[in-house]
Amino acid sequence: MTQWEYRVIHINFEKNTTEQQPDPEVASEKLGGTLSPEFLAREFPKQYSPETAAKSPPKHPAVQLQDFLNLMGKEGWELVETSPVGPLLMFFFKRPLRDSGQPPLRATPAARTNALDAETALADHTARPNSGMTGTT
């Protein structure tokens, strides 16, 4: 019997269609002020620094999602379903459960960096791994 490993990712969709540079003030407001703009800028300098914003304009959301899905594929994950849950879109992935003696599939460091940048950009607090679990089918 094939055993499977599952991963669930959720993405928050907002109706904002303009591409904007990440702003710690806006992010703090979205979080209800629980994290100050200063804290966000200090703890996430790659996302909120003016130098980063000038070097890399934001990617279109479709490109960000494509980069992320390609990373998941390189790591052996197959997208098996998407399903809306309230304002979230849930992405369900599976891959065969690997023997404990086999090394995990990992994308190259460059691919991982690009996709993680995409995940961070999608996130602008929108795309985050939610959980991983194993099971059998």
Image (cartoon, grey):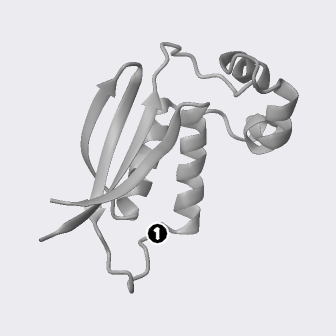
Q: Nearer the viewer, residue 47 or 136?
A: 136
Q: Residue 59, relative to residue 2: is it above or below? A: above
Q: Is residue 8 visible?
A: yes
Residue 28 location (% of width, % of height)? 74, 21
Residue sitting at 56 percent across and 16 percent down? 18
What residue occupies the far left of the structure in this picture? 1
- Residue located farthest toward the bottom when viewing the structure as drawn: 101
Quarter holding residue 118: top right
Q: Is residue 93 above or below residue 124?
A: below
Q: Is residue 62 visible?
A: no
Tell me: residue 43, above or below residue 14.
Answer: below
Q: On the rendered image, what quadrant is the C terminus found in?
A: bottom left
The quadrant the N terminus occupies is bottom left
Residue 93, position in %: x, y?
Answer: 31, 50
Q: Identify residue for label 1.
A: 106
Res. 37 image quadrant: top right
Residue at x 39% of width, y 86% of height: 101
Helix, strand or loop under label 1: loop
Q: Residue furthest top?
A: 15
Category of crowding for the residue at label 1, using alpha-carbon neighbours closer than 10 angstroms: few (below 14), some (14–19), many (at least 20): some
Q: Position of residue 20 (x, y in %)?
A: 65, 22
Q: Residue at position x 84%, y 33% from top?
A: 39
Q: Nearer the viewer, residue 22 or 58?
A: 22
Q: Nearer the viewer, residue 100 or 19?
A: 100
Left or right of 106, for residue 53:
right
| Residue 103 higher or lower than 31, as above or below | below
Left or right relative to 91: residue 14 = right
The percent coordinates of residue 76 (x first, y second) are 34, 64
Rendered image quadrant of residue 43:
top right
Q: Amino acid at mark 1?
A: Arg
